[in-house]
Amino acid sequence: MHSLVRTLYPICRSITGDGLRRTLREIQRLVPLTLHEVPTGTPVLDWQVPMEWNVRAARIETLSGDVIVDFADCNLHVVNYSTPVDAVVSRAALADHVHTLPDQPTLVPYRTGYYAERWGFCLAHRVWEGMKDSHYRVRIDSTLAPGSLTYGELLVAGSEQQEVLISVHCCHPSLANDNLSGIAVATEIARHVLSRAHRLSYRLVFIPATIGSLTWLARNEAVLPRIAHGLVLSCVGDRGSFHYKRSRRGDALIDRTVAYVLGRNAVAHEMMPFSPYGYDERQYCSPGYDLPIGCFMRSPNGTFPEYHTSADNLDLVTPDALEQSLRVLLDVIDVLERNVMYARVDGRGEPQLGRRGLYRAISGQKDQAAAQMALLWVLNQADGTHSLLDIAERAGLPFAQIAAAADLAREADLIR
């Protein structure tokens, strides 16, 4: 996963353009994504697909030709979606087009102007303070023209049509945690579900933020009734504790499952209420859709000092953090996969376990007493209204133990 982050890190991405396509094609080398192109001007709900933006070069130079700021050194230097410019401007006029972080004077900020039709530069405040000349030459070699918005999608069919939606944004330039960590973990989840049979179906979408999810929703009305659970992944590669923002519903099965898994894994975490601010979960959870989709993070957006700066780099994202995030998410998937409702074939009284060989099966397990209690809980609660997660929560036992007990009871024809 960290190797994929390193591969993608240098690419200048945006909500449209060749950098986004190149990123999706790199992912396509690992998993069989289908790439969709949606033309500029296409209506998508209350929005429309914008002009396509591409940038090739940008500089601020002294009039003697010394380069002060160069897009080739850091692609954050250009405000995303800047219009082209080639002019000599006064320092006072340039100040209206310069973004810095006075409180973090050595860092370059990340700024966008998707719909502003302006140009701008981002640079370290220390560099800006050192620029004393009266005039500078500014050049941005970019195009803003009709084109298309690109997104990637992968559907891995299970034995049932109910789907789990995994959504990540792919539109930020060189930001490792707030962009690439989610891409890397989602790609590995895709590889995982492709490698084995599943009950549920899995749909993974790699999209530009906001306009991408709006576009996907507008084009997939027929799919939405099948979305049973979903997660937006972002900022999952840093060393921070886990954070999960609940869906708009607040008590969807995905909300309960993530809370259960984080609690049973005994990792530091915080469950956050839904808010209409954040990532693409706010589109999926808009009132006309209200899909059961939450947002899974480590350090939430805007809460870590490296957020949207040049310090969100390859050192901030670690292989260990990526792996831990992946393992928690695979545990969530495992619970969703196995969380079904059973009913007793004959629910009158407790069945005789000995003649069915169930005591022998239990005696082979590591914790025999807990395994027996798990089986008794399953046999008592299997009435067609309680899921295995319901039973695990009520019994205070690991979900895997409850699921194993259910397997034994099903094999003995006690539940269906």
Image: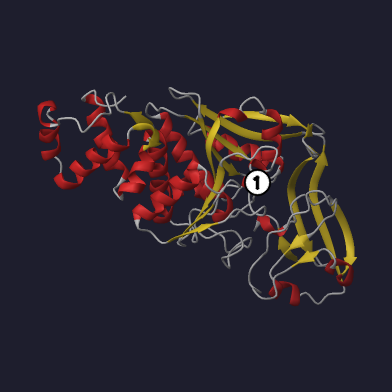
Residue 371, picture quadrant = top left
Q: Residues within 10 Å of mark 1 (few under 14, many from 20)?
A: many
Residue 57, placed above or below residue 165: below
Is label 1 in a helix, a strand or a loop?
loop
Instruction: Tell me which residue sits at (38%, 26%) in the image.
Output: 197
Q: Amino acid at mark 1?
A: Cys
Q: Is residue 373 visible?
A: yes
Residue 8 lies, in percent from the top left, at 55, 46
From the viewer's perspective, tell me whether residue 327 is left or right of residue 278: left
| Closer to the camera in the image, 142 or 221 | 221
| Closer to the camera in the image, 222 or 148 | 222
Residue 282 lies, in percent from the top left, at 65, 47
From the viewer's perspective, tell me whether residue 138 is left or right of residue 405: right
Q: Is residue 323 visible?
A: no
Residue 169, picture quadrant = top right
Instruction: Tell me which residue sits at (72%, 69%) in the image.
Output: 100
Residue 183 lies, in percent from the top left, at 53, 44
Instruction: Tell me which residue sits at (66%, 76%) in the image.
Output: 103
From the viewer's perspective, tell me whether residue 130 is left or right of residue 374: right
Residue 341, picture quadrant = top left
Instruction: Tell me which residue sits at (32%, 33%) in the image.
Output: 382
Residue 299, placed above or below residue 196: below
Q: How many marks?
A: 1
| Residue placed furthest toward the front | 348
Residue 36 lies, in percent from the top left, at 66, 29
| Residue annotated with mark 1 | 171
From the viewer's perspective, tell me whether residue 178 is left or right of residue 195: right
Residue 359, placed above or below residue 281: above
| Closer to the camera in the image, 57 or 213 | 213
| Quadrant position of the C terminus in the picture | top left
Residue 246, placed above or below residue 100: above
